[in-house]
Amino acid sequence: MLKIFIDGKAGTTGLRIAELVAARGDLELITLPEDLRKDTKARRNAIFAADAVFLCLPDTAARESVALAHGSNAVILDASTAHRTAAGWAYGFPELGADFRKAIQTSKRIAVPGCHASGFLALVVPLLRGGLLPRGVLLHCFSLTGYTGGGRAMMEEYTADTRAANDFLQSPRQYALGQSHKHLPEMTRIAGLTHVPVFSPIVADFDRGMQVTVQLHQSQFASPVDLPLLLDCYRQAYCGQPMIKITQSDAFGEDAFAASNTLRGHDSMELTVQGNRERVLLIARFDNLGKGASGAAMQCLNIAFGLDETLGLCF
């Protein structure tokens, strides 16, 4: 039985990971009394007693926990932004290629991808590798997310009483207006892009779900493409990957709505391509706490310990 410690269990990602751990008979959760939750010595002892440690902390605290883990044998899975582009850390998106999967299998340090970044990379990387998009392409992306992506503080902000008293909370809100969102470095580096994309994240009044969309003109592709060609590229890239599903373009009517919370409660991701021969929409839908956070972290845990990667996950 694997022993698991969650450093930062009180946050949204940590709480969801704790639920996933509790539902499995092959995992044992190491817990600390509430008064020792932030105690350095107690946390270090828990880390050294664990086979795997999930860090669900702000970046600075995550770095401190990694320092505490020095000398332990635990696999560290960091759900913060702190190590996603750091040397020596595996990037926890196994579907991006055999090298990504092998790094997760062999590393003691795994960075769980950002939620927005997960959708963006799933959409863009296969097209770049397939030569359909040039590395120097100027990309634009927007992403709709549920408010649980903002952690406990935002969840408290979206309580029923607060919403009723603040009209602005009932409207979708665009943020990171200065184009310095914390996911941009991994979106750029992991994809291998020459230019940082323009990125517009938007939080709306629903708890869980995410829809990432990359908008493209035909002229941005390396050569002319159509929707079936793009879908085929995704099918080839993600063949045999159980956590990513490809949906036909015609599954959506021209006047249909694409809801952002369609995969709420699931740990998988759905990709589709919409538009026409002139303008294309690449769309990824998933749960921001599923494939966007806790589900992705548990998938990486399964891979790191040689288990079925879907074990305990909903797909």
Image (cartoon, helix red, strand yellow):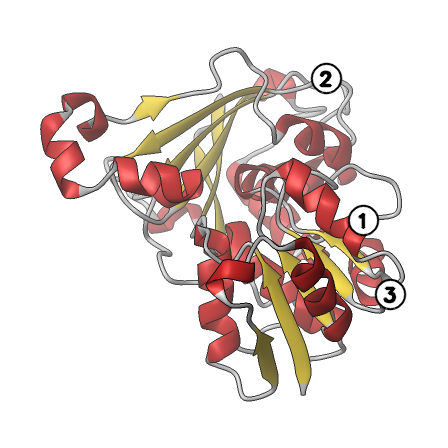
Which x, y percent locates residue 156?
Answer: 29, 41
Between residues 157 and 216, which one lies in front from this camera angle?
Answer: 157
Q: Which residue is depicted at the point 67% across and 78% down?
A: 3
Q: Which residue is depicted at the point 57% across and 51% down?
A: 56
Q: In this view, does 215 lie above or below 295?
A: above
Please name the amino acid that badge 2 sits on: His
Which x, y percent locates residue 209?
Answer: 37, 48
Q: Which residue is depicted at the point 37% across and 45% down?
A: 148
Q: Give residue 195's mark.
A: 2
Q: Nearer the viewer, mark 1 or mark 2?
A: 1
Residue under circle 1? 67
Callouts 3 and 1 close, C-beta under 8 Å: no
Would you say residue 280 is visible in this rendering? Answer: yes
**Please, what secondary structure does the residue beneath circle 3 have?**
helix
Please name the amino acid that badge 1 sits on: Ala
Label 1 CA crowd tier, 10 Å (few <14, some 14–19, many 20+): few
**Please, what secondary structure does the residue beneath circle 2 have?**
loop
Q: Looking at the image, is mark 3 or mark 1 earlier in the sequence?
A: 1
**Please, what secondary structure does the residue beneath circle 1 have?**
helix
Q: Looking at the image, is mark 3 or mark 2 earlier in the sequence?
A: 3
Callouts 1 and 2 close, C-beta under 8 Å: no
Residue under circle 3? 106
Disc 1/disc 2 C-alpha distance (Å): 33 Å
Label 3 CA crowd tier, 10 Å (few <14, some 14–19, many 20+): some
